């Protein structure tokens, strides 16, 4: 498994500001993922962060709104820029690690964001 | 059509009963399938994964996969109140070199004493 630390655990932000969420894992991993989980909804993948290359964004998510950094194999950040109330959500990072013949995604505890 | 669809809930079963959770997927290239459990206010935790047709058992949990029917299910035997949670079906997207997952909308399970 993996121990994933995500900060902050929650925040309340004003419209128009930006928030950077940090994700730290206890061992080196190649792939890190950022998800959004809106209230009462399932997980939607925002982007995949591979160390040493640009993040790959899913349809509906753009780098200007959700810039991602991946400076090394144990750390990544997601910034939610120019926030609006529609960005109120839980943001989760996950990492992929091998478990026998398969790679498994393990999740951090999430960041609960409220935008006023 | 949703890529990953789970049976609509919420599902309520009495303690000791078998809970059956179902999931269908649209991408025939998908090879790996995961069941996550998410307690309210917590992050998803992996219960089981399956990638071969048939059944896979782990304690009280059994995952069933039928690739021809594009169907995967999770059975929970001897359900306990502590099993009450949202269960998320996740499908690994075919054709990618890494584990990109698509999640279903989740099924809320309540096990009542």
Image: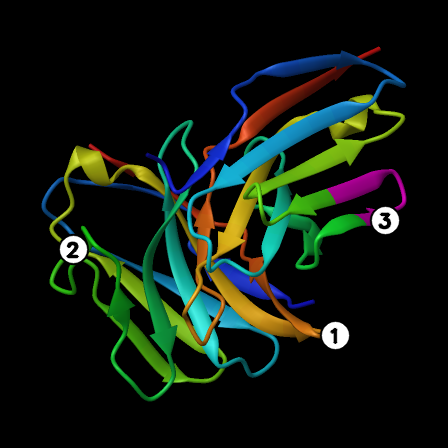
Whether residues under marks 3 and 2 lie with C-beta atoms below 8 angstroms apart, the answer is: no
Q: Is residue B98 toward the left or the right of residue B18 in the image?
A: left
Q: Secondary structure at mark 3?
A: strand
Pointer 1 residue: A100
How many angstroms separate mark 3 from mark 1 (CA)?
15 Å
Circle on res. A81: 2
Name the colouring of the figure. Answer: rainbow
Q: CA distance from mark 2 to mark 1?
A: 38 Å
Q: Quadrant of the N terminus of chain A?
A: bottom right
Front in this rendered view, residue B18 or A77: B18
State the image coordinates of residue B47 (x, y, percent, origin top left): 71, 48
Residue B20, position as x, y percentages in the image: 72, 26
Q: Is B62 rendered above or below residue A57?
A: above
- Measuring 38% from the left and 84% from the top, which residue is drawn there? A51
The region drawn magenta spans B56-63
Q: Is residue A103 above or below residue A86?
A: below
**x, y percent for residue B104:** 47, 38
Magenta stretch encompasses residue B62:
yes
- Left or right position of B99 against B39: left
Q: Is residue A93 above or below residue A91?
A: below
Of residues A55 and B2, which is closer to you in this image?
B2
Q: Nearer the viewer, residue A71 or B19?
A: B19
As measured in the structure, the alpha-carbon distance from the residue carrying label 3 to the one carrying label 2 is: 43 Å
Residue at the spot of label 3: B58
Classified by dominant secondary structure, the portion drawn in magenta counts as: strand
Q: Tag 2's secondary structure? A: loop
């Amino acid at each position: 498994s993996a121990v994933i630390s995500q900060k902050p655990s929650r925040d309340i932000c004003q419209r128009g500001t930006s928030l950077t969420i940090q994700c730290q894992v206890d061992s080196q991993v190649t792939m890190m993922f950022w998800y959004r989980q809106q209230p009462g909804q399932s997980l939607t993948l925002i982007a995949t962060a591979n160390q040493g290359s640009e993040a790959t964004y899913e349809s509906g998510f753009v780098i200007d709104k959700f810039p991602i950094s991946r400076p090394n194999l144990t750390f990544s950040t997601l910034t939610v820029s120019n926030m609006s109330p529609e960005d109120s959500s839980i943001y989760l990072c996950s990492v992929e690690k091998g478990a026998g013949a398969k790679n498994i995604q393990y999740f951090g505890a999430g960041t609960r964001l409220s935008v006023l | 059509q949703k890529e990953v669809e789970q049976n609509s809930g919420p599902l309520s079963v009495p303690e000791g009963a078998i809970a059956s959770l179902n999931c269908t997927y649209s991408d025939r290239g998908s090879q790996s399938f995961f069941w996550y459990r998410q307690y309210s206010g917590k992050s998803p935790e992996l219960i089981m994964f399956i990638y071969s047709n048939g059944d896979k058992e782990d304690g009280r949990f059994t995952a069933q996969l039928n690739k021809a029917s594009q169907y995967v299910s999770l059975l929970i035997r001897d359900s306990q109140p502590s099993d009450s949670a949202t269960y998320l079906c996740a499908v690994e997207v075919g054709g990618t070199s890494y584990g990109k997952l698509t999640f279903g909308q989740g099924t809320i399970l309540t096990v009542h004493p």
